[in-house]
Amino acid sequence: KQEVTQIPAALSVPEGENLVLNCSFTDSAIYNLQWFRQDPGKGLTSLLLIQSSQREQTSGRLNASLDKSSGRSTLYIAASQPGDSATYLCALETSGSRLTFGEGTQLTVNP
Amino acid sequence: EAQVTQNPRYLITVTGKKLTVTCSQNMNHEYMSWYRQDPGLGLRQIYYSMNVEVTDKGDVPEGYKVSRKEKRNFPLILESPSPNQTSLYFCASSPTLAGGNYEQYFGPGTRLTVT
């Protein structure tokens, strides 16, 4: 059974810092990995999707990498802003049309 | 606007009183699913549907029912709610799943409290 771990559970940084969120998984037989953002009281917003054959994806200040052999993905946020404060979740699609989520990293960017 | 809608957004009910949470998407997506989110447990899949009339159990289906009579709608039914079903529920949709390069779109969530 796929298990997904996100470290750290919470992170607080000053505005302007570059930061890395980590996601590790136990089963490398994945179709893709997706990073989401969740704001309090709201649903999930997709940030980046990396297919299993890809190594990374970029969108603006966000860069996500995928290393299937080591069972790891990272989400890099450059020049963080207070508006980046949210919970970030990674999710993996595996066989059987399943999405398995990590518990998330709660990010606070202080002005 | 492309979106997934859920109703109601907030619901407080009593044990045993049947309820339905509706989910609708306007993107002609084939795949729809329901998740519950609980502190310390993260998001867990309840049921999913690959297409009309095709549904299957996720990781935590006990106590829930679903139906997929139309492509756009995927209601979640709690026949006899219990306090352990107090949770935040999300509906999601995608053009398809199973290896495609497709993102999941999530609804805004339904916060359910069963007393």
Image (cartoon, rainbow, N blue to C red):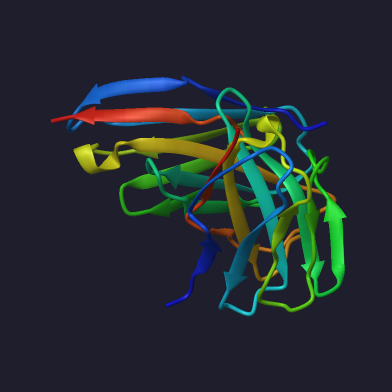
Q: Looking at this view, is A48 or B111 the one in front?
A: B111
Residue B51: image location, x then y, percent: 80, 72
Going by the picture, which residue comes out furthest to the left? A111
Residue sitting at 48 percent across and 75 percent down?
A: B2
Q: In which quarter of the image is residue B59?
A: top right
Q: Is residue A52 left or right of residue A23?
A: right
Q: Is residue A89 left or right of residue B56?
A: left
Residue B57: image location, x then y, percent: 85, 49
Q: Quadrant of the N terminus of chain B?
A: bottom left
Residue A98 visible in this rendered orientation of the protein = no
Q: In which quarter of the image is residue B25?
A: bottom right
Q: In which quarter of the image is the C terminus of chain B?
A: top right
Q: Quadrant of residue A66?
A: top right
Residue sitting at 61 percent across and 56 percent down?
A: B91
Q: Is residue A88 left or right of residue B91?
A: left
Residue A22: image location, x then y, percent: 51, 28
